[in-house]
Amino acid sequence: MPSIVDALVCAVTATLLWTWLGLPISRRITPGPLAVPIAPALGWAVHSAAALPVFFVIGFSRTTVLGLTGLCLAAATAALLLQKRLHEHGQAHARLPMWALAAAALLAFAPAAAILPKIVGDSVALSAPIFDHAKVAMIDEMSRLGVPPGNPFFGETGEPTLLAYYYLWHFSAAELTLLTGMSGWAADAGLTWFTAFASLATMMGFAVWLSGRASAAVWALAFSFTGSLRPVLTLFFKAETLDSVIFPATGFGGWLLQSAWVPQHVASASCVLLAVFLMSEMAQRRNLLLPVTLVFVVVAGFESSAWVGGVTFALIAAAAGLIILNMVPLSQRPPFLMRATAAAILALALAAPLLRDQYMMTALRAGSSPVVLRPYEVLGEFFPVTLRHILDLPAYWLVLLPIELPAIYPAGLVAMRAMITSKELDPKRKLSAMTFAGMTIASLIVGWLGVSTIGNNNDLGWRAVLPAVMALIVFTAVGLSDWLATRRHIVSAAAVAALLRGLYQGAQIVRDDATGSVASFSNLFAKTSTMWEAVRRHSAPDERVGNNPLFLQDATPWPVNLSWALLSNRRSCFAARELTLPYVPVPRLRQEEIEAQFVRVFSGEGLSDDVRDLATRYGCRVVVVTAQDGAWVSDPFAVSPYYRLAETKAGEWKIYTAPALGLAQVEELRAP
């Protein structure tokens, strides 16, 4: 299992690599004060989006990763040596202090801590966000077998093993695995830290640049670490009463909550923020590097999150484009349109392989549209269903957002309005403020009306608000630093009070992520590490293993095969329904049938035909039965002609292997 040191090695590697690659770009295309703060996020976006197609061609291995990384670092070093000074635009502005970056680095440990295991005696404590990091299996898949990745969650013999997911962020983690030699789990934790740090630095950089005050960085950090108002409300109302009036809490939330659960979407939101800023810069300066950089940033945003960098960014880009066309002089509009159109075409071309795969996945699922228009559910069962659907429309703006984003929503809107109506901002910063405002409204509208139908959750509604969250943090930090400097005591006091209300749950999130919880599964989970080591001895890197999809299901808020995902470093025959629904292009009903079949086998109630299917239809080359499975007592594998016992540990687990079969043999065995 990964240690803090393992994660630190990955985090430091990521920071040094992508900051160094981002600096020569940011110094040429942005105002001087922004060059350092946005360099980590910019370097990651450009390098990752450009490197992925290269590795499709040259192969993805430790040798190729080391070689390409060395070339990129050499090119970045040469570019930096040729640059005599930061590219300045107009008068000098306040810069982000180095101590602020150090503070961001320290605070970024909060989301990263949620991913790491906490060793408590002979047990392992886990935090709730680890549920969404079962995608470590994707990182291991790529670092082990290359790109494009196969599907580690399910595979049927003779069928293509397509991965139905946007995987650029996880590809970056696989790069860290190959560069450092650390595990996929450690790389995931390290990249989570880097993503949090890079997004914090980006927000602080924009807050300082827009306000002209270094103090805005402090407030950007503080507002980032806020949470929902729900815990405060439960001090005055019973939780049951609150849930009956307001729909129970979901994955919808602020930066702190989502940075631990879904760092890939946070990385995409950082790309959206950068892309909107680059659009405003591109309208004012003729610099070939600007549209080229924009292309890679847009591609990185989409390939890390189809919901944030795809669906949401489409509306955001349209809103930002209209604002820019309305604000720039008439003579600058045709060149901007030409550059923006060329950038859009190039971005589509570069993202075409993943776009094609996403389209194929949707078709293979044979389901409805992946996105539908439907108001976000806000109100609870206290309201009649017919009335609820009507009231949900205004309740999103008047109830949900003030509750889930109490520190930044009201104050951020006030600060945003003050900025876009200010006559003191220079034209460059005014245009950026206007485009950020358009991005905020567009992002919130997508979360308001857009619903994703893939999987069990409304991922679109939950993640679409992230660009708005980041922009509101910037606006609130700018506003409060200005209100304090100009001695506007009432509005300052209101903003600080909102901050304190949000920090109440923020502190709870940090505490829970850092400590985790020790439960009945904790001791057994710790022991499974040696079990998966044994499995790897009996399986080739590209072979699939089968185990109970409900094994240790109480380790996470929702049942997921977490031990396999984090520790096996092998593909699964059928990981679990929570892992196949969003990532496997198979209709939902068929997935439910397969899960029932696997559960039946490992509960000890499977038929001989079920065991035959595991060996022939699902390619379960290795099978693990644990003492917690019903099959431990009523073992269908022990009497099956398709499997033989390969290794056992008394009272804990048994490993069975099946002979490798060709397609002709599989078809023969399948025949009645």
Image: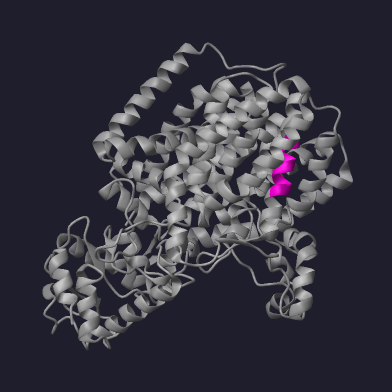
Quadrant where the image shows the N terminus: bottom left
Instruction: Locate residue 460: give its quadrant.
Output: bottom right
Frontmost residue, 499 versus 447? 447
In the rendered image, residue 619, in percent from the top left (x then y), is placed at 22, 67
Q: Measured along the vertical axis of the image, is residue 665 above or below residue 103? A: below
Q: Measured along the vertical axis of the image, is residue 78 above or below residue 440? A: above
Quadrant where the image shows the C terminus: bottom left
Q: Is residue 438 magenta?
A: yes
Q: Is residue 188 left or right of residue 617?
A: right
Please give the name of the residue rendered at 56% of the width and 40% of the height, measured from the top-left corner.
271
Q: Is residue 224 magenta?
A: no
Please give the name of the residue rendered at 54% of the width and 38% of the height, measured from the top-left corner.
298
Task: Give the tally of numbered discs.
Answer: 0
Frontmost residue, 338 versus 211? 338
Instruction: Locate residue 566: give its quadrant.
Output: bottom left
- The prevailing secondary structure element of the residues shown in magenta is helix
Frontmost residue, 345 versus 132? 345
In the rendered image, residue 48, in percent from the top left (x then y), is placed at 43, 37
Please give the name of the residue rendered at 52% of the width and 69% of the height, measured from the top-left corner.
456
Q: Measured along the vertical axis of the image, is residue 656 above or below residue 19? A: below
Q: Is residue 479 left or right of residue 31?
A: right
Instruction: Locate residue 432: give its quadrant.
Output: top right
In the rendered image, residue 414, in percent from the top left (x then y), is placed at 82, 46
* Magenta span of residues: 433-442
Q: Measured along the vertical axis of the image, is residue 531 above or below residue 91? A: below
Please give the name of the residue rendered at 65% of the width and 40% of the height, measured from the top-left corner.
317
Here the colouring is: one colour
Q: Is residue 321 left or right of residue 263?
A: right
Visible residue check, residue 623: yes
Visible residue check, residue 37: no
